[in-house]
Image (cartoon, helix red, strand yellow):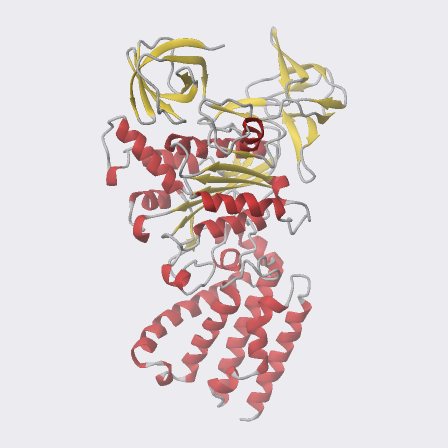
């Protein structure tokens, strides 16, 4: 029930200053003016308040009423989230378009995030008399062909089940369970609400030991991230940040994807909206949208809503994590979010810090990234949230505040390189500037898959890349011909590794996704090429003989010619490599 809590005193862009404010609390959700523009109280001082409005304030004048229901900015959680496209404050864009018959979002429009008419098949999982506590599962709903939605007791509710609905069809407004908590009886519906700025509770934090498989070789092999890990992807304009996040959204082995387009250009979000509904998950052969929530908050939308979109996305992710799923969040980009903070801070006349950003920018970044992690949920299941946040430093300057502060709170960095991007090397992740602190934690998983040599293989190729970096300095001065063949084989191996392994074609049906098993075999054969080539050179062979081998070109093409299901063909190339090198060595015996 809305009531008037004050009136508009002045309007400064998306910030509205109110006077005569009563019965208000920090972070309360409010509606401003007769168009009922959605906003949030961000500052209180006596009977004055500053309100962050998430819609266009054009036409709003002093004296307009401000309404409040006395609740914080929250999101609706329940079946129907997957496959839906929302804006930054969880308004369903498709539903708005179909009801308003317009491609524009009218100011003040209000529409529930979850369809109130759609019926869901509920399957009870508890019996009357059962003692339950917050976070436990009382029933299930088949939300999509991929995901079983688990209906949860809201956190902080506990007691004895007094009634549970029979198996059948229910809307999100229907009660499916009643819990007697003390003298009260709490109704459990298919939907619940949760304030976006408050992290949902968990039972325990768990170590990160399972990798998030992305299908991108440079990531999985060189700079892997664990499920529950945090990553920053900094890069200048045009280096491929959005393309990497698109690839991870399509191919990573997370159960749920939450993609947040925060302040990005409209054409980039259009690509997501057009391509995602047509994509098929390579593991389940089901449409990818069945496991995806899209939050579209493009650069032409009100700037204040960018700030809310990040929290909307992480809260939805926490809800599915609490059901026992592994969730991956793509935040593209946190720079636009930080810029929104800077603009709103300036309009509220707060003291600026580095480059005009508010002094609390590091705190906000830390609060966001620490909501990720591998956890034991309140129901006893394991769930995780992996966060991949892109950063768009102006001019590609990694020393700017957003990049520097973000690096303090994440454990994995995929640094995008302008020269690689200009050379059409995708993904343009620099193997010299990037790092991952998850390697040792997830090594057991990879060691078991590879037969015990993954760490050694990875370490050796990184050493060769370091050697190649030093040799390239000599090559740039005097050319490669002055180097001995024992060093030129290093250059040839690294060139092969960069072109046949690190470079990946996201439009090729075979190369767009690479399984861990194929990655290991590809890495192994490239290192064997180096070992056998070096051995042949020491016997008297020269680098040109090795480069002209037929098997050398087969290794270069294997990422396109061998599918993930035909790994025995890599073994055949490996056998051919050994026999070809033996023939060369035999010439000098």
> From this viewpoint, which residue is outermost toward the right?
167
Q: From the viewer's perspective, is 11 left or right of 202?
A: left
> From this viewpoint, which residue is outermost toward the top?
183
Instruction: Indicate the position of residue 481 as horizontal and vertical percent values.
Output: 37, 84
Instruction: Indicate the position of residue 322 as horizontal and vertical percent values.
Output: 58, 31
- Residue found 52% across the figure and 77% down from its top: 531
Q: Is residue 555 visible?
A: yes
Q: Quadrant location of residue 577?
A: bottom right
From the viewer's side, name the closer residue of 231 and 180: 231
- Residue found 56% across the figure and 93% down from its top: 587
Q: Is residue 89 above or below residue 502?
A: above
> From this viewpoint, which residue is outermost toward the front?
101
Instruction: Indicate the position of residue 353 as horizontal and vertical percent values.
Output: 24, 36
- Residue found 24% across the figure and 33% down from its top: 352
Q: Is residue 153 above or below residue 355?
A: above
Instruction: Indicate the position of residue 551 as horizontal and vertical percent values.
Output: 59, 79
């Amino acid at each position: 029930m809305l009531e008037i809590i004050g009136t508009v005193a002045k309007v400064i862009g998306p910030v509205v200053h109110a006077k005569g404010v009563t019965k208000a609390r920090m972070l309360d959700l409010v509606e401003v003016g007769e168009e009922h523009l959605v906003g949030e109280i961000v500052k209180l001082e006596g009977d004055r308040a500053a309100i962050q409005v998430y819609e266009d304030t054009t036409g709003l004048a002093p004296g307009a009423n401000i309404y409040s229901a006395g609740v914080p900015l929250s999101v609706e959680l329940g079946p129907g989230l997957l496959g839906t496209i929302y804006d930054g404050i969880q308004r369903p864009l498709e539903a708005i378009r179909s009801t308003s018959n317009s491609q524009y979002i009218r100011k003040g429009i209000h529409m529930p995030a979850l369809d109130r008419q759609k019926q869901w098949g509920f399957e009870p999982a508890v019996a009357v008399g059962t003692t339950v506590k917050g976070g436990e599962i009382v029933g299930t709903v088949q939300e999509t062909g991929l995901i079983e939605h688990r209906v949860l007791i809201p956190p902080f509710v506990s007691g004895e089940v007094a009634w549970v609905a029979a198996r059948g069809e229910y809307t999100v407004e229907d009660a499916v369970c009643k819990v007697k908590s003390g003298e009260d009886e709490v109704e459990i519906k298919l939907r619940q609400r949760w304030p976006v700025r408050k992290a949902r509770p968990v039972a325990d934090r768990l170590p990160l030991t399972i990798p998030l498989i992305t299908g991108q070789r440079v990531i999985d092999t060189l700079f892997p991230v664990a499920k529950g890990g945090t990553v920053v992807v900094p890069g200048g304009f045009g280096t491929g940040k959005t393309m990497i996040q698109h690839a991870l959204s399509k191919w990573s082995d997370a159960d749920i994807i939450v993609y947040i387009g925060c302040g990005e250009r409209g054409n980039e979000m259009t690509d997501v909206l057009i391509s995602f509904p047509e994509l098929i998950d390579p593991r389940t052969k089901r449409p990818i949208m069945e496991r995806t929530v899209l939050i579209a908050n493009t650069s032409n939308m009100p700037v204040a809503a960018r700030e809310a979109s990040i929290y909307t996305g992480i809260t939805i992710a926490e809800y599915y994590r609490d059901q026992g799923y592994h969730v991956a969040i793509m935040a593209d980009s946190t720079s636009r979010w930080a810029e929104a903070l800077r603009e709103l801070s300036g309009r509220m006349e707060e003291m600026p810090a580095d480059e005009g950003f508010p002094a609390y920018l590091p705190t906000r970044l830390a609060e966001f990234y620490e909501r990720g992690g591998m956890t034991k949920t309140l129901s006893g299941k394991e769930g995780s949230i992996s966060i991949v946040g892109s950063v768009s430093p102006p001019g590609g300057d990694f020393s700017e505040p957003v990049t520097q502060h973000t690096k303090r709170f994440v454990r994995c960095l995929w640094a995008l390189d302008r020269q690689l991007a200009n050379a059409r090397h995708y993904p343009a992740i620099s193997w010299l500037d990037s790092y991952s602190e998850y390697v040792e934690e997830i090594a057991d998983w990879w060691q078991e898959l590879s037969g015990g040599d993954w760490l050694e293989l990875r370490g050796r190729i990184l050493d060769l890349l370091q050697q190649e970096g030093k040799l390239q300095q000599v090559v740039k001065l005097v050319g490669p011909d002055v180097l001995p063949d024992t060093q030129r084989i290093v250059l040839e191996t690294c060139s092969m590794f960069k072109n046949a392994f690190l470079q990946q074609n996201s439009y090729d049906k075979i190369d767009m996704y690479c399984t861990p098993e194929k990655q290991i075999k590809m890495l192994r054969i490239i290192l064997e090429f180096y070992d056998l080539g070096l051995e042949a050179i020491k016997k008297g062979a020269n680098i040109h003989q090795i480069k002209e081998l037929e098997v050398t070109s087969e290794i270069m093409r294997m990422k396109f010619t061998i599918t993930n299901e035909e790994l025995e063909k890599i073994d055949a190339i490996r056998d051919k490599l050994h026999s070809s090198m033996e023939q060369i060595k035999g010439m000098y015996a």
